[in-house]
Image (spheres, rainbow, N blue to C red):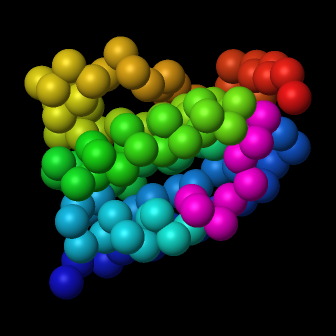
């Protein structure tokens, strides 16, 4: 089985979840366990996908569910580091416009767009 890891970092008003490995049917439950434990009310959840070379329908469903959940909590989901195949999945399925995507390194806060949510 290929290597897979999920790491969480809290930075000011943002939480960065870094995923490394394929985001698919087998690995999505691990990401869900981590993201379910993250406090996102009125915060930005940054999902760093620079280490994700492959995204299947389960991964797409996970991203859409995270988007709905963060939005319902007054938060923002921000995707970073999309490799070619995951980016292509979003484009082919017409879901790319649902997400805010950045090329900024998510381990820093210098280049991230501001998020001001009201309580």
Tell me, yes or no, if residue 82 can be seen here.
yes
The correct choice, above or below, for 34 with respect to 109 in the image is below
Q: Within the magenta stretch, is there residue 40?
A: yes
Q: Position of residue 78 (x, y in %)?
A: 55, 32
Specify whether 13 is left or right of 58: right
Horizontal side of 47 relative to 42 (left or right) equals: left
Which image quarter is the C terminus in? top right
Name the one closer to the observer, 7 or 103.
Answer: 7
Quadrant the N terminus occupies: bottom left
Point 69% across, 26% down: residue: 112
Q: Is residue 75 above or below residue 69?
A: above
Q: Is residue 39 magenta?
A: yes
Question: Which quarter of the figure has residue 115?
Answer: top right
Q: Which residues are magenta?
A: 35-43
Residue 101 pos. (x, y %)? 47, 25
60 shown above or below 26: above
> Going 36% across and 50% down the picture, which residue do you hit?
62
The structure residue drawn at horizontal position 48% and vertical position 44%, both measured from the top left corner, is 66
Identity of the residue furthest to the bottom in this view: 1
């Amino acid at each position: 089985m290929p290597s897979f890891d999920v790491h969480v970092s809290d930075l000011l008003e943002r939480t960065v979840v870094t995923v490394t490995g394929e985001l698919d049917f087998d690995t999505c439950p691990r990401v869900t366990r981590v993201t379910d434990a993250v406090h996102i009310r009125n915060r930005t959840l940054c999902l760093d996908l620079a280490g994700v070379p492959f995204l299947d329908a389960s991964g797409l469903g996970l991203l859409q569910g995270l988007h709905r959940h963060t939005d319902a909590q007054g938060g923002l989901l921000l995707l970073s580091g999309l490799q070619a195949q995951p980016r292509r999945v979003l484009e082919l399925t017409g879901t790319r416009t649902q997400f805010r995507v950045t090329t900024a390194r998510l381990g820093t806060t210098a280049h991230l767009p501001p998020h001001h949510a009201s309580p």
